[in-house]
Amino acid sequence: MSDFRSIGDLSSSLRLRHLNARLKADAGRLGAELASGRAADMVRRTNGDLGRLNGFEHGLGMLKAYGTAASEFLTLASAMQTALGAVEHQAADTGATLVAASNTLTSASLGAGADAAREGFRAAVGALNTSIAGRALFAGRAFDTPALAGADTMLAELEGLTGGAADAGAVRAIVADYFDDPGGGFQTSGYLGSAETAGTRRISPTETARADILASDPALREVLKGLATAALAGGGGPSLDLSARADLLRGSGEALLTAVDGVVDLQAALGATEARVEAAEVASSAEASALETTRNAAIAADPYRTATELQNVEIQLEALYLATSRLSQMTLARYLR
């Protein structure tokens, strides 16, 4: 008889253990839902419609990708604006300096003007060789190479080409050929980037953007040409008298002041693209926020229902512990008889 009672006790003990494990699991699940506000069983919460939930996640992933593309574009565009601003500054300031220097026919004044142009050329080339995270900004698809050869390298080549020039007009013609001729030195060895502009970036389901300014852009070449021409008035290239040197500085200064407008146009066009990208970024952020709110509502656990169920489970656990304690006492009493 005692054997049958032992088997019965064992069966009751196993049932209680299983019930205890289930109630503990329910308590853990409900506690997690109450803390996170999200349902633990998504299949049950969505009535088996996981496709809708996957649609939310896909949409949020795409919007995040658009936001990243827009942010990266704006970072590059900001750096490009800074570089273009430096080039525009060199054109305006150096242009005014050259015009002023050309009015004084002294070797010192003309030499100072030529030196200013040389430094301006170096600064402009440096600005156009700007890179962000190892990516050249003005080299088109040639991301991993500087857009331009070194400033001193190009000036040395121009000094060699103009060494035999007899007057300012001849110097200007040679420099113009260097920068403007499709087969000239600038195209063959001065500009190191790609002829193809950087690709477009998709910034929304319906919009793309591109920053397609190359260091070989005509507006930028005009600035480089004006600075380089004036730099040749300082010696090392053609042997010119004071009058010819003054003529070279004056013509270059006036050309630089005119070239400012072209650089400003590039800045304005890039600025318009920046504004469009910023608007798309804001729209994507707002859409992502709305979609996330909808998704959270779809997977949210009802806090009142969850708290009520958790309380019921806790009551059942307390009752189970009490029953287990009584069963243990009864089993011990039987054993002692």
Image (spheres, rainbow, N blue to C red):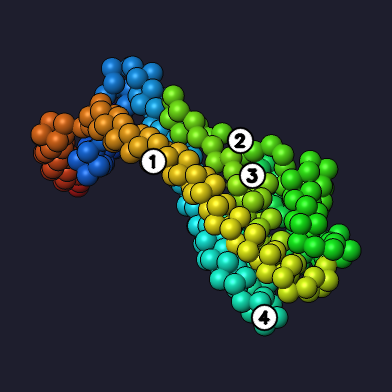
Cα distance between the residues tagged 3 and 2: 17 Å
Q: Residue at x 58, y 40 (%)?
A: 212
Q: Amino acid at mark 2?
A: Gly
Residue at mark 4 to residue at mark 1: CA–CA distance = 49 Å
Residue at screen point 61% across, 55% down: 255
Mark 4, residue position: 106
Residue 17 in picture, x, y percent from top left: 28, 37
Picture quarter with the C terminus = top left
Residue 104 on image: x %, y %:
61, 76
Question: Residue 177, percent across and down?
Answer: 79, 48
**Dots 3, 4 in contact, CB < 8 A:** no
Q: Is 172 in front, or is 63?
A: 172
Tell me if mark 4 has few (under 14), some (14-19) or many (20+) residues whose alpha carbon lies within 10 angstroms of its own. some
Task: Report the residue marked by disc 1.
Answer: 275
Neighbourhood count class around disc 2 (C-alpha, 10 Å): few under 14, some 14–19, many 20 upward: few
Say which quarter of the image contains residue 227. Answer: bottom right
Mark found first going from the N terminus, 3 or 2: 2
Instruction: Determine the CA span between mark 1 and mark 3.
Output: 22 Å
In this view, 203 is above or below 93: above
Mark nearest the camera among 4 and 2 is 4
Local SS, label 1? helix
Residue 231 visible at all: no
The answer to which of 184 and 106 lies nearer the viewer is 106
Q: Secondary structure at mark 2?
A: loop
Q: Are marks 1 and 3 in contact (CB under 8 Å)?
A: no
Q: Is residue 153 above or below residue 134?
A: below
